[in-house]
Image (cartoon, rainbow, N blue to C red):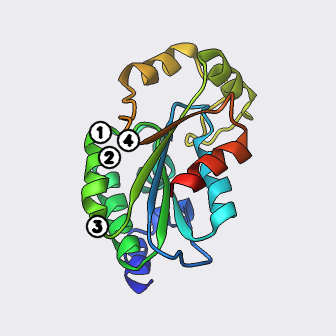
Amino acid sequence: MREVEKIIADNPGPWEAIILPELKPARPYVLGISGLPGSGKSRLSRALWTNRRDAFYIGGENITFAMFNVGKPTASQYVEAYDWIYKLIDSIVQEGYGVIFDSTNPQKTYRDRLRKLAGDRAPVFFAQLVARDGTLLKRLAERPVSDDPQTVARNFPPATLFEFKRTFEALRPDEGVVIDTEVNDLDGQIAIINQNI
């Protein structure tokens, strides 16, 4: 894991946004979790890490915040952060570990780049979490109030959610699964993903 640790050490800001594996999987893999705010990405990603313990957990938005200390990065900051994340993922896969990576809206160009990066070394699988607008807004309203700009505050206006939806890119059927978080509880979501990795 020396190369992975070197990449992380070269950019110490994101270190706290990464959870290290406890086990090594039979083969490396890359799992991308996406979904609108309130869909349960972070909750599922952390639960998967706890369930599997054979992957690095990387929170995409947490990394961009750690690198730039802003809630919403500029386009160039976003590109810089994802260049660093993909360099890290490449090194993790080379060393034979899994990656659980969550991000609100990894667009098709980024998903394709991730598949190309992993190549034949590791399967890449995506899961997109969905729920109705009312459910997303209710979940966002139930979040605790925080002064931390990284945290989506309780007063998340519906217009902001609808702006996220406007630019959101759905998965293609051959890229992975769409999981309705209103129908599947956390254990059901984990089971669906574990069947596909």
Circle nearer the N terminus (2, 3): 2
In this image, 104 relative to 109: left or right? right
Q: Nearer the viewer, residue 40 or 79?
A: 40
Q: Distance between the residues labelled 3 and 1?
A: 19 Å
User: In terms of image quadrants, where is residue 37?
Assistant: top right
Q: Nearer the viewer, residue 10 or 130?
A: 130
Residue 81 lies, in percent from the top left, at 35, 53
Q: Which callout, 4 or 3, points to the residue nearer the camera? A: 3
Cβ–Cβ under 8 Å for marks 4 and 1: no
Q: Which callout, 4 or 1, points to the residue nearer the camera? A: 1
Residue 155 seen in the current view: no
In this image, 43 relative to 88: left or right? right
Please name the residue that numbered disc 1 is placed on: 108
Q: What residue lies at 74% left-to-right and 35% top-to-bottom?
A: 144
How packed is label 3: few (under 14 Cα within 10 Å), some, or many (20 or more)? Answer: few
Residue 82 lies, in percent from the top left, at 33, 53
For residue 106, the mark is 4
Element at badge 1? helix
Circle nearer the N terminus (3, 1): 1
Q: In this view, does 104 lie above or below 53?
A: above
Q: What amino acid is at disc 1?
A: Lys
Q: Identify the image quadrant of the N terminus.
A: bottom left
Residue 34 lies, in percent from the top left, at 48, 40
Q: Nearer the viewer, residue 36 or 30?
A: 30
In this image, 65 relative to 171: left or right? right
Cβ–Cβ under 8 Å for marks 2 and 1: yes
Q: What residue lies at 52% left-to-right and 21% top-to-bottom?
A: 161
Q: What residue lies at 41% left-to-right and 72% top-to-bottom?
A: 92
Please name the residue that numbered disc 3 is placed on: 120
For residue 111, the mark is 2
Cβ–Cβ under 8 Å for marks 3 and 1: no
